[in-house]
Structures are given as structure tokens and as C-alpha cells.
Image (tube, grey):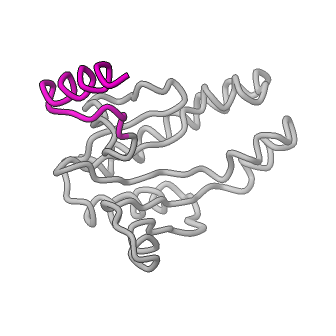
Amino acid sequence: MRIWTLVLCTAVAACGGSAVEDRTTTPAKAPATATTADPGLKTMVSQHRFADTVTRLEAAITGKGLRVFTKIDHAANAKGAGLALPPTTIIIFGKPQVGTELMATSRSVAIDLPQKMLVWQDGTTVNITYNDPAWLQARHGLDAKAALLKKISGLLGAVANQAAH
């Protein structure tokens, strides 16, 4: 047993790491493309600072006739709990007429509505991430609303693009 412990410790030291995987490290940076590895999410890199991106996103949302229901500053909440989190803010918004139409078709979509856009900073990169409406269609069986979801997809992309560029 002592030999195996010595071998393991030597191997770990040679690799400069730990025998236990550290799952508390910062996740890998999102790619600078319009999608992430998760097919249910779309991510866009912003050309602006974090605070400016949040402000621009709110303006883009209201400028398209959508209602901002609330904004949650996760980093501020973490700080209040004595923890640290890089800038992370979610804006929850929508248009009740459209959301209600989707919920009338499939009530389960209410778990994913209202719409949300997340602004988060990773190092010096500011990202905007949101749910892909095509994913909502597949998840909630909204095939009958495919045309509406395609329209929503275009709107969300335009809002994110306006905030990011």
C-alpha cells in the first residue's frame, strides 16, 4: 500500500497537480461565437464593458416594445452573502400577449418564461447568453408555434446584437 501511495504522490507532483479533481475552478471561457456548447443556449460576445452592456441590453429590450420585469445582480447578491462572483446579471423580460399564447399551447413552457438574458463577465470578456427558442419548441412540444418561435428567435438575436455591438 505504501508503494502505491508513493507512486501516486510522485506522479501527482510530477504533473504539478492534485490527485483530486478540483471542480470549483472557473469554467472554460465561452466561445466568441453566437452559440455555446449547449444547444439550448445562444451566447454573443459584447464589445462593451459589463455595465454598459447591461444598460444597452435594457434599452434594446424596451426599445423593441418588451417589458423588463426585473433585473437580478447575482454578483451583488453573492457579495451580500460574503462570497465573490464575477459580474453576473440576468434581465427578465417579455411580452405577456406572446408568452400567454405559448403557455396556452403548452403550459410547461411557463417554467422557461418570461424570457431571460444573462450578461456575464469571464476575465475581460463580456457575454450575453439566452435560451434558444428552437430549444423551447423542442422541449415543450411547441411545433404548432414554430413560426412564432422563429420570430421570437429573430427578435432575441436582434436585441442581443444591439446590446453587444
Horizontally, residue 77 falls left or right of residue 20, namely: right
Confirm whether the magenta stretch covers residue 159: no
Q: Residue at x 67, y 25 (%)?
A: 147
Measured from the top left, where is residue 53 in percent x and y? 29, 58
Q: Residue furthest front?
A: 2
Q: Main secondary structure of the magenta part?
A: helix
Horizontally, residue 134 falls left or right of residue 15, namely: right
Q: Nearer the viewer, residue 15 or 121?
A: 15
Confirm whether the magenta stretch covers residue 16: yes
Horizontally, residue 10 falls left or right of residue 120, namely: left
Q: Residue at x 20, y 59 (%)?
A: 49
Above or below: residue 98 compared with residue 30: below
Q: Nearer the viewer, residue 147 or 29?
A: 29
Q: Which residues are magenta?
A: 1-22
Q: Total number of numbered labels? A: 0
In which quadrant is the N terminus drawn? Answer: top left
Measured from the top left, where is residue 69 in percent x and y? 60, 67
Q: Residue at x 85, y 35 (%)?
A: 105
Quadrant of res 152: top right
Above or below: residue 4 compared with residue 59: above
Quadrant of res 89: bottom left
Quadrant of res 37: top left
Measured from the top left, where is residue 17 in percent x and y? 21, 33
Measured from the top left, where is residue 70 in percent x and y? 56, 69
Q: Residue at x 74, y 28 (%)?
A: 145
Q: Residue furthest bottom?
A: 80
